[in-house]
C-alpha cells in the first residue's frame, strides 16, 4: 500500500510542484521561471473568482450539511418505526457515484422541474436553474443531498455511543429536551463533530465531480471552482505549469485550514470535557 501510494500519489504531486516553477504547457520543452507562475496567480481575476466561489460554496455547504445531518441523526436515533430501513435509505445517496448523481439531477433540473413549473404557471420553476445566475444553488442542493449520508452516519454512531443512563438521570433532574441536547448530547459527540467539520471543509474546497457533471463551470465561469479551473485550464488550456502552481496553493490552503480547524475544535473539546 505504501508503494502504491508513493507511485500514484506522492510522485505525481512532487512532479506537479516541480513543474509549477517552469513554463511547461503540458507538452514539449520547458524552462525554469522561478515564482512567475505564483505571481501570475495573484494578478489573474479568473483564478481569484474561482477561489471566491470555492470558499463561498465550501462555507455554505459545510454549515448546511452538518446542521441537517445532525438533525437527521438525532431523529434516527430516537424511538421511531422502521428505524433500520430509514437508516439504509438515508445512506443510499452515498453509495451512488457522484457523476451519476450529477447527470440524474441535471435531467431533473433541466426537464422535470421546468415542466412542473410550466404546468403550475410558477415562473421561477419554469426554467433550468443550472442555466441561470443561481446555478450554484442547484449544485449546492445536490452536494448536500449526497453528503448528508456520510455525515449522518458519523453523528449517529456518536449518538449511539452515549449511555442511556445519562439521559435518564437528566430526566430525573427535570431537564428540558433542549438542555439535554446542548448540555449532554453535543459535548459528548464533540469529537464526531470535529471529524465531520474537517472532512466537510476539505471535501467542499476540492469540489469537482458535481460541477463537471452539471454545469462544467458555467454559465460562463460562475460555478468554476478551483479544482475545475485546474483541470480545464491545465489539461485543456495549455496552462499546465500555472495550474500546477494553483494546485500547490490549493494544497497549502486546504492543509492550513484543516490544521487550524483541528487545533480550534480540539481546544473546544477539552473545554467541553
Image: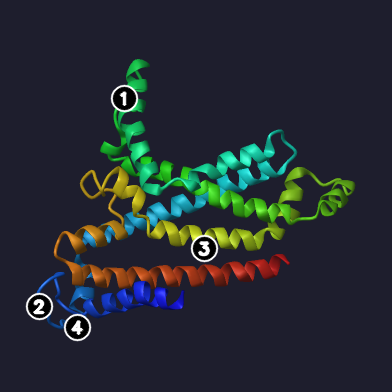
| Residue 97 seen in the current view | yes
Disc 3 to disc 2: CB gap under 8 Å: no
Of badges 1 and 2, the one in the foreground is 2
| Tag shown at residue 160 | none
Which mark is drawn over residue 126? 1
Instruction: Please name the residue that numbered disc 4 is placed on.
Output: 34
Q: Are marks 1 and 2 in contact (CB under 8 Å)?
A: no
> Residue 198, labelled with which disc?
3
Q: Residue placed at 88% from the left, 49% from the top?
A: 173
Left or right of residue 166: residue 200: left
Mark with earlier residue (4, 2): 2
Spot occupied by residue 193 in the image (x, y as percentages of width and height)? 60, 58
CA gap between label 1 and label 2 equals 51 Å
Q: CA distance from mark 3 to mark 2?
A: 40 Å
In this rendering, does residue 64 appear at all?
A: no
According to the image, label 2 marks what residue?
Answer: 29
- Label located before the other in sequence (1 or 3): 1
Which quadrant does the C terminus fall into? bottom right
Density class for disc 4 (Cα within 10 Å; few <14, some 14-19, many ≥20) is few
- Inter-mark Cα distance, 4 to 1: 52 Å
Quarter assignment of residue 71: top right
Q: Residue placed farthest to the right in the image?
A: 172
**In this view, the mark in front (4 or 2):** 2
Label 3 and label 4: CA atoms lie apart by 33 Å
Amino acid at each position: 500500500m505504501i508503494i502504491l501510494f508513493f507511485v500514484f500519489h506522492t510522485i505525481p504531486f512532487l512532479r506537479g510542484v516541480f513543474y509549477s516553477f517552469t513554463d511547461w504547457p503540458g507538452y514539449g520543452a520547458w524552462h525554469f521561471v522561478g515564482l512567475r507562475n505564483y505571481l501570475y496567480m495573484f494578478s489573474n481575476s479568473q483564478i481569484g473568482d474561482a477561489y471566491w466561489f470555492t470558499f463561498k460554496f465550501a462555507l455554505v455547504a459545510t454549515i448546511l450539511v452538518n446542521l441537517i445531518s445532525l438533525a437527521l441523526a438525532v431523529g434516527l436515533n430516537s424511538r421511531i418505526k422502521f428505524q433500520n430501513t430509514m437508516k439504509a435509505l438515508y445512506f443510499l445517496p452515498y453509495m451512488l457515484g457522484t457523476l451519476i448523481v450529477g447527470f440524474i439531477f441535471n435531467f431533473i433540473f433541466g426537464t422535470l422541474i421546468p415542466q412542473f413549473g410550466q404546468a403550475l404557471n410558477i415562473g421561477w420553476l419554469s426554467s433550468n436553474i443550472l442555466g441561470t445566475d443561481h446555478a450554484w444553488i442547484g449544485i449546492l442542493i445536490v452536494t448536500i443531498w449526497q453528503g448528508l449520508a456520510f455525515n449522518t452516519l458519523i453523528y449517529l454512531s456518536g449518538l449511539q455511543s452515549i449511555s442511556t443512563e445519562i439521559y435518564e438521570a437528566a430526566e430525573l433532574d427535570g431537564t428540558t429536551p433542549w438542555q439535554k441536547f446542548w448540555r449532554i448530547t453535543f459535548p459528548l459527540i464533540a469529537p464526531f463533530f470535529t471529524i465531520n467539520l474537517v472532512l466537510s471543509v476539505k471535501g467542499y474546497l476540492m469540489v469537482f465531480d458535481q460541477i463537471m457533471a452539471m454545469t462544467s463551470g458555467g454559465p460562463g465561469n460562475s460555478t468554476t471552482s478551483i479544482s475545475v479551473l485546474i483541470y480545464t485550464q491545465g489539461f485543456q488550456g495549455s496552462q499546465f505549469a500555472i495550474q500546477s502552481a494553483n494546485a500547490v496553493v490549493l494544497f497549502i490552503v486546504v492543509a492550513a485550514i484543516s490544521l487550524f480547524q483541528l487545533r480550534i475544535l480540539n481546544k473546544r473539546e477539552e473545554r467541553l470535557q
